[in-house]
Image (cartoon, rainbow, N blue to C red):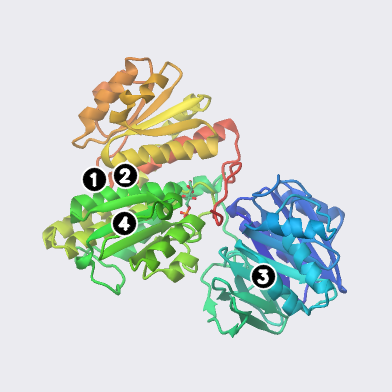
Amino acid sequence: MCGIVGILGVTSATPRILESLKRLEYRGYDSAGIATLEGGTLDRRRAPGKLENLARKLRDNPLTGNSGIGHTRWATHGEPTEANAHPHMTDRIAIVHNGIIENFRTLKKELLDTGVTFEGETDTEVVAHLLTRYLKEGLAPHDAFAKTLSRLEGAFALCVLISGEDNLMFGAREGSPLVVGLGEGENYLGSDAMALASLSNRLIYLEEGDWAELTRESVQVFDARGNKVERKVAISQVASTMVDKGNHRHFMQKEIFEQPTVVAQALGRYLDPNAGKVKLPDMPFELATVSKVTLVACGTSYYAALVARYWIEKLARVPVEVDIASEFRYRDPVYASDGLCIFISQSGETADTLAALRHAKEAGQRVMVLVNVMGSTMAREADVVLPIHAGPEIGVASTKAFTCQLSVLAAFSINLAAAKGMIDEAQEDAYVAELESAPKLMAQVLHHDEKLQEIARSIAHARDVLFVGRGIHFPIAMEGALKLKEISYIHAEGYAAGELKHGPIALIDEHVPVIGIAPNDDLIDKTVSNLQEIMARQGKVVLMSDDAADEAEHMFAYFKMPTAGALVTPIIYAIPVQLLAYYAAVEKGTDVDQPRNLAKSVTVE
Ligand code: F6R
């Protein structure tokens, strides 16, 4: 999603903004731009495509000035052309925006009626013209900005420079995140701590409705009613050095191979193997009183929630409901008294998940979040935060965050079961020991990646691929299909193996690879039977299992997995499906780390 950075500085702004935009690349974008203010005059450069295109423009035609704003745009209104790229400018202001102005049509009509002409199709341009109108009407910048904000509906983070105002920058946050960075004789604005990491670690996270007026020497924050408010200064832990790919070709590959390490780190925070216990942070409620768990998330995080349902119901015998965040609040969910709602989000900023969290909170539910970004909005709004400790995930397709989410959810499930008295100390000890084995088994899987590379080559040019699994591995089948779709652009679907004959089996022929996820559990025979049905119709079956080698002889390919218990299999089976997608994408030559149309942090509904 769009990324914002603003610098009110004492040295040349452009190279510093470019570096910050580079840090924001991971969010996904399709055009970029920078505007600077020099001697009271605004100027800008914009380019569709990658930041390199903008950098080239800047080399040919540099932008001077110590203050500036920059933007990476993920198109919502209007194609990713130069005209639609931010910053948007009038003769008075330059503005960058993340989010959607929902009443932009009404505002645009109002502005068109007064003779304003628009350059592109974005919703942001109405904000630029509205603010310009109020400035031209003679309002002081502070009042003009406040009046502009009062006219806007929707979700936005804004950053604004005004011509003739060399020591002034405005920012506003409503629905989309925005952070103020405090410097020495300089101040900054950015979408997140990552954007500002090379500039400052002293941050003010703006709250909903807040807006900020910055000079080089001061920062004033106002709430939605325009009252001056104090917000606390947080110290960011995000490293100022740029995260790099190490020896890997892509961030995604690096992040896949990092999984044994980060999962061990995450488990280290939640498991006490000596005591044979799970240790969770203190909670403002008793877990033993939880009558129902509601898990809500989007995309890959939603699949982590689906896996957790099996663990929580099996171990703790607490009813679990799982929903996609964008559906949850619109179906008017029935909350249980003493219910616990858990929201899972790598970024902690996903608009739908955040809206669902607020819905649950308003309904008086206890709210827990699993996030990877500690300063994120969800982390700040929840009653309990369980960090997943995956470290920065740069590849747009989530990999290590998924297995860390699963690891923390497994630990939580054990803890809930113990709190509910459904397992005794010896069982808790055994589950903790089982979970502890995950990193070692993950490393074993990664050791055989060349076999997956070979399989990936043979499916990379398929038009459709199906993934099937049963029970707790059904969500892994869906995750495998999502990974393949998003980075290799191959159409893929994940099905419960038993569902195939109720329709999807009609798709099977000799051109359709089917990936079967079948660990040796009490469902293996049934899954293998379903795979036989596919083979009988010439489907190309690729089996991932720690057993069934005999059946595998007749299959298209077999990937041997280590044997593990049900708390660990979903975690380790995530790896071969990730690698299959990764190698298929490499074979096809797609943009693995920033696949087309996708954004890392989805801050619009
Ligand atoms: C897929 C992927 C997405 C995210 C989804 C939710 O690889 O990364 O499906 O899982 O956009 O994002 P978060 O977890 O940040 O809420």
Mark 1: give few (<14), some (14-19) or many (20+) Cα within 10 Å: some
Residue 142 image point, x, y percent: 73, 79
Mark 1 vs 2: CB contact within 8 A: yes
- Give the number of the disc on residue 570: 2
Considering depth in this image, is 240 or 286 the residue closer to the camera?
Answer: 286
Camera sees residue 454:
yes
Question: For mark 4, what is the residue?
Answer: 334
Disc 3 to disc 1, how far (Cα)? Answer: 52 Å
Residue 549 image point, x, y percent: 26, 26
Q: Amino acid at mark 2?
A: Pro
Disc 1 to disc 4, how far (Cα)? Answer: 30 Å
**Closer to the eye: label 3 or 1:** 3
Disc 2 to disc 4, how far (Cα)? Answer: 29 Å
Mark 3: give few (<14), some (14-19) or many (20+) Cα within 10 Å: many
Mark 1 near ligand 1 (CB under 8 Å)? no
Question: For mark 3, what is the residue?
Answer: 149
Q: Is residue 243 left or right of residue 468?
A: right
Q: Is residue 323 left or right of residue 137?
A: left
Secondary structure beneath label 3: helix
Mark 3 vs 4: CB contact within 8 A: no
Question: For mark 1, what is the residue?
Answer: 566
Q: Amino acid at mark 3?
A: Leu
**Closer to the eye: label 2 or 4:** 4
Q: Is residue 592 left or right of residue 398?
A: right
Mark 2 near ligand 1 (CB under 8 Å)? no
